[in-house]
Amino acid sequence: MKQSIALVLGSGGARGLAHIGVIEEFEKQGFEINSVAGTSMGALIAGLYAMDKLQDYKEWSLTLEKIDVFNLIDFTFSSQGLIKADRVIKKMKTFIADKNIEDLKIPFAAVATDITNEKEVVFTTGSVYEAVRASIAIPTVFTPVKKNNVLLVDGGLLNPIPVNRVKRIGNNILVAVNVYADIPHTKEKKQTKKQLEVQSFYDKNIKKFKQKLNEIIPKSNKSKLGYFKLLNATTSIMIHQISKMTLDIYKPDILVDISRHSCHTFDFYKAEQLIEIGRLAAKESIEIYKKQ
């Protein structure tokens, strides 16, 4: 009989792609996932898994190096955020239809933060995409979601690894994936010609984005650009510390650690590498669990 697990996927931007590899390894080794919960990118992957559409998303994410990634980013440069993220969601809907959470094959929960009333919001009903869109709204980067007269942003501000929000069923064990782990990251092997071409493409577009930002923001305010970088770095440190405290309080049966140094928040073009990182980390954690 397969060991059932309640799987919790933490927030962490592009590092959340590692969750795909984690899921694949657990299933390969005979574990059965019968409930999921997640925050931010973890909410997206958890939701897709509960929809039984994770493979479709994986295949699409692996093609991102072949298309103009920046065509999927709808820049707004508003005071509430630089990106709306609606274009990405709209694109995903073309090959993965939305569903209501209550109709999914297994229980799913996504966490967001209500900054109007300063409290956590847990989605267990309604549209999967609406829940995910609220959960991924990184402050100053993605515009917040307005719902019922409140503003919803990234759930990582209050609960980056929602181990207390996943449904426990029968004798399932608790598995948590922390992509903010303060552990060394094994350096990549020498990049192939193809990987170098992708990196060059990415760097050129980032440079264009910064130039565009300089054109839009008045010269007298350009010094404020450092504010966004500072705030994002501060948020990252905060999420890392909250994650540590959460895992101390709610100790999972299996903890899968992914180095927070494995990639930058928006390195989504590294899907193949990050999925493999997740698979290897899961394999190591499962081996430790089985030896106990």
Image (spheres, rainbow, N blue to C red):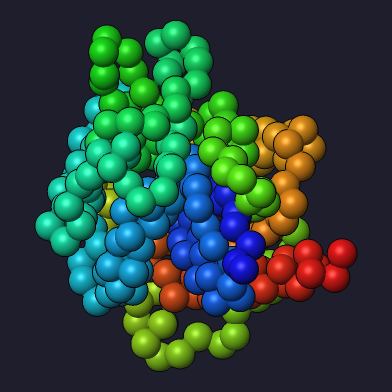
In the image, residue 28 lies at what x, y percent? Answer: 55, 76
In the image, residue 220 lies at what x, y percent? Answer: 33, 26
Asked whether, in this view, residue 158 is left or right of residue 70, the answer is right
Which of 241 and 234 lies nearest the eye of the viewer?
241
Asked whether, in this view, residue 104 is left or right of residue 19, the answer is left
Residue at 56% across, 51% down? 7
* Total labels drawn: 0
Which of 229 and 89 lies nearest the eye of the viewer?
89
The single residue placed furthest to the front in the displayed view is: 1
Asked whether, in this view, residue 179 is left or right of residue 150, the answer is right
- Reply above or below: 38 against 224: below
Residue 151 appears anywhere in the view: yes
The single residue placed furthest to the right in the displayed view is: 292
Quadrant position of the C terminus in the picture: bottom right
Residue at 58% across, 49% down? 6
Which of 73 and 24 lies nearest the eye of the viewer?
24
Which of 5 and 268 lies nearest the eye of the viewer?
5
- Reply above or below: 18 against 158: below
Residue at 29% across, 26% down? 145
- Reply above or below: 177 against 190: above
Residue 217 appears anywhere in the view: no
The single residue placed furthest to the bottom in the displayed view is: 193
Residue at 35% across, 51% down? 105
In the image, residue 17 lies at what x, y percent? Answer: 46, 61
Quadrant position of the N terminus in the picture: bottom right
In the image, residue 23 lies at what x, y percent? Answer: 52, 65
